[in-house]
Image (spheres, helix red, strand yellow):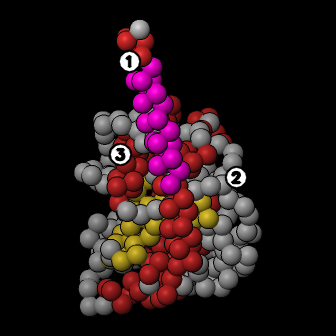
């Protein structure tokens, strides 16, 4: 009888611990919604563009060790993919998720100016790939798309394929990037990318561990929404009262680089990827209801001003 009572008390304790864990997770999500809302207000760009910020949810991060690293990618505690001249005087740090609508809007609106600055040796970009939407919405499209982009890095085609992925981003609720065959078809839009090696890398999930380590780093970074964009370590959400346009970004880079020598640009610069949905330099958005763990934009729409 005593044994049964002991078992009963232990079971009750376990249920209580599980309930407390759920309540703590719910509280964390609530705090993240508030933080995401403040980021949203700061990141709203001039020109009346509605910008979404996706907040980190309570999805469990992978625990895989980094077992493989793409060519020229940075390792350590914050794995990243570099784009542009390594010795460029300014650095743009971007934390993003290929399923994130806000990331698509940022990348679409700022693509022209970031490419221009990279190709002129003024700016190098460092991309940290995360999987927030997989955690919040379920699925593995964020993971699979990030792995495919890293496979493209091995072929020297990261920037091109990165842009194709955003130009063909499915609706947030549709986990289309989970389909590896779809990712392989998109690779056909980048000249010279499709190959047996790329196909094997995508199908094998070669860089899943690298992506998960990057996602873990995001969780420990203190940042709560994507995209998180920093110029030379300064959060652009806090620059120019948060109203940063492509023209303002160019101005900030030029000011930071004044008197400094541009980086050495490789003659084999990335060629433009095949155009697709959202490939223009402008972006627009309509407000829509978001799930718990994310914030929606104010009801304004418009185009990102050209630089």
**Residue neighbourhood size for the residue with mark 1, other residues' Cα within 10 Å, grouped as few (<14), some (14–19), many (≥20):** few
Residue hosting label 1? 6
Q: Quadrant of the C terminus?
A: bottom right
Q: Is residue 30 above or below residue 242?
A: above
Number of the label disc, if any, that sits on residue 213: 3
Magenta region:
8-27
Q: Is residue 133 above or below residue 90?
A: above
Q: Is residue 61 above or below residue 169?
A: above
Q: What SS does tag 2 mark?
A: loop
Q: Is residue 52 above or below residue 276?
A: below
Which one is nearer the viewer's eye here, 1 or 271?
1
Residue hosting label 2? 171
Count the marks: how many? 3
Q: Residue at x 36, y 90 (%)?
A: 255
Q: x%, y% of residue 251?
A: 44, 89
Q: Nearer the viewer, mark 1 or mark 2?
A: 1
Among the two numbered marks 3 and 1 on one chain, the one whose residue lies closer to the N terminus: 1
Residue 226 in sight: no
Give yes or no for residue 199 being in the magenta stretch: no
Q: x%, y% of residue 258?
A: 31, 90
Residue 228 in sight: yes
């Amino acid at each position: 009888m005593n044994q049964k009572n002991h078992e009963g008390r232990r079971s009750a304790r376990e249920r209580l611990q599980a309930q407390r864990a759920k309540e703590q997770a719910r509280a964390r999500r609530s705090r993240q919604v508030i933080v995401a809302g403040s980021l949203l207000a700061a990141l709203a760009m001039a020109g009346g563009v509605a910008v979404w910020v996706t907040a980190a949810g309570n999805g469990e991060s992978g625990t895989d060790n980094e077992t493989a690293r793409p060519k020229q990618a940075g390792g350590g505690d914050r794995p990243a993919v570099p784009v542009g001249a390594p010795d460029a005087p300014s650095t743009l740090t971007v934390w993003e998720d290929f399923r994130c609508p806000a990331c698509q809007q940022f990348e679409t609106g700022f693509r022209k100016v970031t490419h221009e600055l990279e190709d002129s040796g003024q700016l190098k970009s460092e991309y940290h790939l995360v999987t927030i939407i997989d955690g919040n919405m379920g699925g593995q499209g964020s993971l699979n798309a990030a792995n495919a982009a890293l496979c493209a890095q091995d072929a020297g085609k990261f920037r091109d394929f990165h842009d194709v992925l955003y130009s063909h981003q499915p609706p947030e609720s549709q986990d289309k990037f989970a389909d590896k065959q779809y990712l392989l078809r998109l690779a056909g839009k980048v000249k010279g990318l499709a190959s047996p090696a790329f196909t094997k890398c995508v199908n094998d999930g070669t860089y899943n561990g690298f992506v998960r380590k990057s996602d873990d780093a995001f969780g420990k970074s203190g940042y709560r929404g994507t995209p998180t964009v920093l110029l030379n370590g300064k959060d652009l959400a806090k620059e120019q009262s948060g109203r940063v346009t492509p023209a303002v970004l160019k101005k900030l880079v030029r000011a930071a680089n004044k008197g400094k020598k541009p980086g050495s640009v490789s003659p084999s610069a990335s060629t433009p990827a095949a155009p697709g949905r959202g490939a223009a330099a402008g972006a627009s958005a309509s407000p829509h209801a978001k799930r718990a763990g994310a914030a929606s934009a104010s009801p304004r729409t418009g185009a990102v001003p050209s630089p």
